[in-house]
Structure formats: C-alpha cells, structure tokens
Image: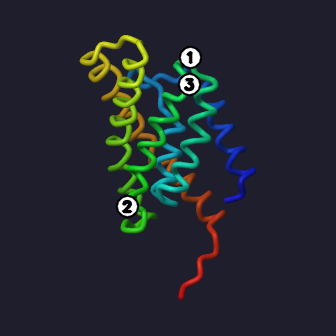
Amino acid sequence: MNPYLMLTTLFGLAVLQSTVMPRIHILGVHPDLMLMVVTSWSLLRGSEEGMLWALIGGAIVDLFSAAPFGVCTLSLLIVSFLSGLGERHIFRFDLLIPILVIPVVSLVYGGLTLVLLRVLGWTAGWRDSLTQVLLPFSLVNTLLMPLVYLIMRTLYRRTARKETSW
C-alpha cells in the first residue's frame, strides 16, 4: 500500500478515535475504530502488515491519549499479530471471520490494556472493568465490525498488489 495513503488513513483514524468517538456512547462504552481497522487489515493482509498498521496507528493514538505512551501500541501489536496468523488459511472476504474474531481480540486488547495500566501503577477494579467495560466494548465492536471490515476490504481491493502466480 502507498505509505502516504496508509499514514493519512491512520492519522485520520487516530484523530477521529480521540476526538469524536469519546462522544459516542453505546452501552456505556465507545467503539474503538483503530482496533477494528487494525484487526481488519491484519485479517486481509496478514500479521506483518497488520503489525505495521498497529505500530503506527497505536503510536498516534498514544500521542493523543492520557494513558502512558505505548499502552495502546503494545496492545494493538499483540492483537494484530494474533488476528493475522490465519490470513493465508482463511477465506479473507468472508464477512463471518471478522465478526468471529473481533469479540475475542476486543477482550484480549482490553485485558492487555488493563494489565499494562496496572503494571504502570494505575488502578482498576477487575470485575467492574470486565462486566461494565470489556464485555460491552466487545459487543459494540462486534456490532460495528461488519461496516468497518467492508470499508477496509474495499480499500484492500483498491490497493492490492499484483501478485504473480508461478
């Protein structure tokens, strides 16, 4: 993918994630566009490209965040790696795959974020965080993932490299 298009897309997403999304509350949480986009890209292009998107997008989100720098980036890197593992073995255009993957990666992402914040000295109630934040967060991301995935799939198709078959 064109690096300028990638950087522009990720910067725009990070700005949207940091400014608009906190004002949108569904079930008491706001959707995480960067998580859904990075997961989608990992499913479409594999772990390597997904982790590049996670590194850049996560760093930009971390710059705008009140949390310690690197928390979002590290969590995104791990879930993008896990999401992209099966890229070559799954039917990448099947809409069911991202719908099945996003609730799991949302819980992993949220759990990693809580662990990292705890390690860095921030306090969080585990049970309250799970029931009042992580489960609704996972559900909201799952409900919005088909739309995000369809947009990312369109971007993938428009920017796909010509692959030669031997």
Residue 164 x/y as whole percent: 59, 82
Q: Residue tagged by mark 1?
A: 66
Label 2 SS: loop
| Dot placed on the residue nearer the N-terminal end, 3 or 2 | 3
Q: Residue at x 42, y 42 (%)?
A: 78
Amino acid on which the number 3 mark rests in the picture: Phe
Per the image, label 1 sits on a secondary structure element best described as loop
Q: Are marks 1 and 2 in contact (CB under 8 Å)?
A: no
Tell me where residue 125 sits by quadrant.
top left
Residue 141 lies, in percent from the top left, at: 42, 37
| Residue in the picture at 34% in, 13% down | 124
Q: Residue furthest right?
A: 4
- Mark 1, Cα crowd under 10 Å, few <14 / some 14-19 / many 20+, is few
Select label 3 or label 1 by which is in front. Answer: 3
- Cβ atoms under marks 3 and 1 closer than 8 Å: no
**Residue at x 34%, y 41% (from the top left corner):** 103
| Total marks placed | 3
Q: Amino acid at mark 2?
A: Gly
Quick one: which residue is furthest to the left in this view? 127
Mark 3 closeness class: few <14, some 14–19, many ≥20 residues within 10 Å:
some
Residue 25 lies left or right of residue 136; in this view the side is right
Mark linked to residue 56: none
Q: Image quadrant of residue 126?
A: top left
Disc 3 and disc 1: Cα gap in Å? 8 Å
Disc 2 marks which residue?
Answer: 86
Give the labeled residue for mark 3: 69
Q: Amino acid at mark 1?
A: Ala
Front-lying residue, 163 or 142: 163
Residue at 48 percent across and 59 percent down: it is: 46
Q: Quadrant of the N terminus?
A: bottom right
